[in-house]
Amino acid sequence: MLEQIRTIDKSRLLRSIGSLDRAPMRRVDAAIAVSLGLRGTAGVMTLCGRCARTFRNDGGYEVTRVDPGQRSGESCAYCGSRPGFDYFVEKGAGTP
Ligand SMILES: [Zn+2]
C-alpha cells in the first residue's frame, strides 16, 4: 500500500517477514518516487530502446530509466516484439 507510506522507529519492528527480488523492488521504488512527487505524474513502462527513442523524440516525452543497473527486462509494452527496460515516461516541458 504505497499510497500510505509512514515512517516508524526501527525498534518497533519485531521481525523481518520477507524481502522482494530486484524487479519488484524497482517497481516499488518507482511507485514511491511518484507517490512522493519526485516524479510528477510519471508512468512506468517497459520499453525497448527503439520505442523509448520514439517516445522521447517524436512524442515529446521525458523518458528515463527507472534503474540504470537493470540487466534484463520483460517484453516491450509498446511494440511487444523486443525486450525492454523499465522507464519513467512523463510528458515533457511544454507538452500539452
Ligand atoms: Zn518496443
Image (tube, rainbow, N blue to C red):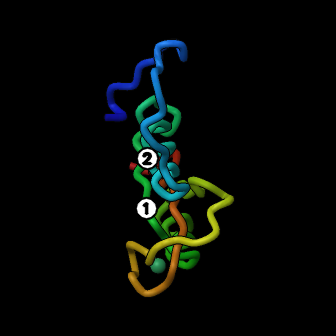
Q: Is residue 8 visible?
A: yes
Residue 30 x %, y %: 48, 45
Q: Residues within 10 Å of mark 1 (few under 14, many from 20)?
A: some
Judging depth in this view, the residue of 32 and 91 nearest the camera is: 32
Residue 20, disc: none
From the image, state whether disc 2 or disc 1 is nearer to you: 1
- Do callouts 2 and 1 mark residues in contact (Cβ within 8 Å)? no
Q: Which residue is pictured at 46% across the width and 73% down the height?
A: 74
Quadrant location of the N terminus in the rendered image: top left
Q: What secondary structure is found at the residue carrying circle 1?
A: strand
Residue 45, disc: 1
The three-letter amino acid code for the residue at tag 2 is Ala
Above or below, comparing residue 52 to residue 40 in the picture:
below
Above or below, comparing residue 12 to residue 25 in the picture:
above
The three-letter amino acid code for the residue at tag 1 is Met
**Extreme residue toward the bottom, this view:** 81
What is the C-alpha distance between the residues marked 2 and 1? 9 Å
Q: Which residue is pictured at 45% across the width and 51% down the height?
A: 27
Residue 58 x %, y %: 50, 70
Q: What secondary structure is found at the residue carrying circle 2?
A: loop
Residue designated by label 2 = 42
